[in-house]
Amino acid sequence: MSMAVAYNRQEVKITETTVDATVPDNDTACLMYYLNCMCCVLQLEVSDYSIKRLRDYKKYYLLTTDEKKELLRLCGLISPEKMDGQCIFHSEEICGVDATNRFFRVDSTDTGFVAAANVFVGAVQVSVTKFMVYKTKWVNRYYIDPINRITRVVTNTTKNNDEWIYTSTSESLDCCVIQ
């Protein structure tokens, strides 16, 4: 899909660049896919091995606990709340019936037409020439639900376990209840 739009007497061309993706049904894979989508629209450099690894959602099972923490941190920097209206836009209508998200490229001398010209990711300023539209179910499936579940898991496995109460139901310690 491609269309041209006149704005302030300048022509702006918007071209769809969506590619189908098959994401494993796993919270880590979903969050990695979200990161990959944001890296596409923000055109973040992928020369860093660690970010390539965090984007490779088909190999989600290879991530270490520390890499999952880094994934959570990065996704927090580029959360939907921070990126909405900058480089991603909620639109059930534009996504249509078959897609939960779609990607577009803006070709113009004024890239600020649809998306913000620049976005800050942490302390780094990046240029925006692509944008994504999404449905509510997409942001729930690939960001909100997985980040909440993974945060709980990482927090539970790394927090100080002093607040847990262990009670044994037998004289041997092979059976206990965690409260």
Image (spheres, helix red, strand yellow):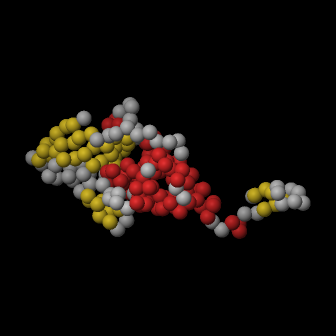
Most distant residue in the top direction: 97
Question: 64 and 163: which one is in front?
Answer: 64
Tell me, yes or no, if residue 49 can be seen here: yes
Vertical relation: 134 (above or below) 35 = above
* Residue 91 is at least partly visible in this image: no
Farthest residue in the right direction? 171
Query: In the image, what residue occupies the spot 48% across and 62% down?
Result: 70
Count of numbered circles on the image: 0
Give the residue drawn at x 54%, y 59%. Answer: 64
Q: Quadrant of residue 77?
A: bottom left
Q: Residue at x 14, y 52 (%)?
A: 109
x and y, in percent, of residue 37 in the image: 38, 49
Residue furthest left in the image: 9
Location of the N terminus by quadrant is: top left
Q: Is residue 39 above or below residue 12?
A: below
**In the image, is 58 to the left or to the right of 92?**
right
x and y, in percent, of residue 148 in the image: 54, 53
Is 176 or 148 nearer to us in this picture?
Answer: 176
The residue at 37%/41% (across/down) is 101
Horizontal and vertical percent for residue 69? 52, 61
What is the quadrant of the C terminus in the image? bottom right
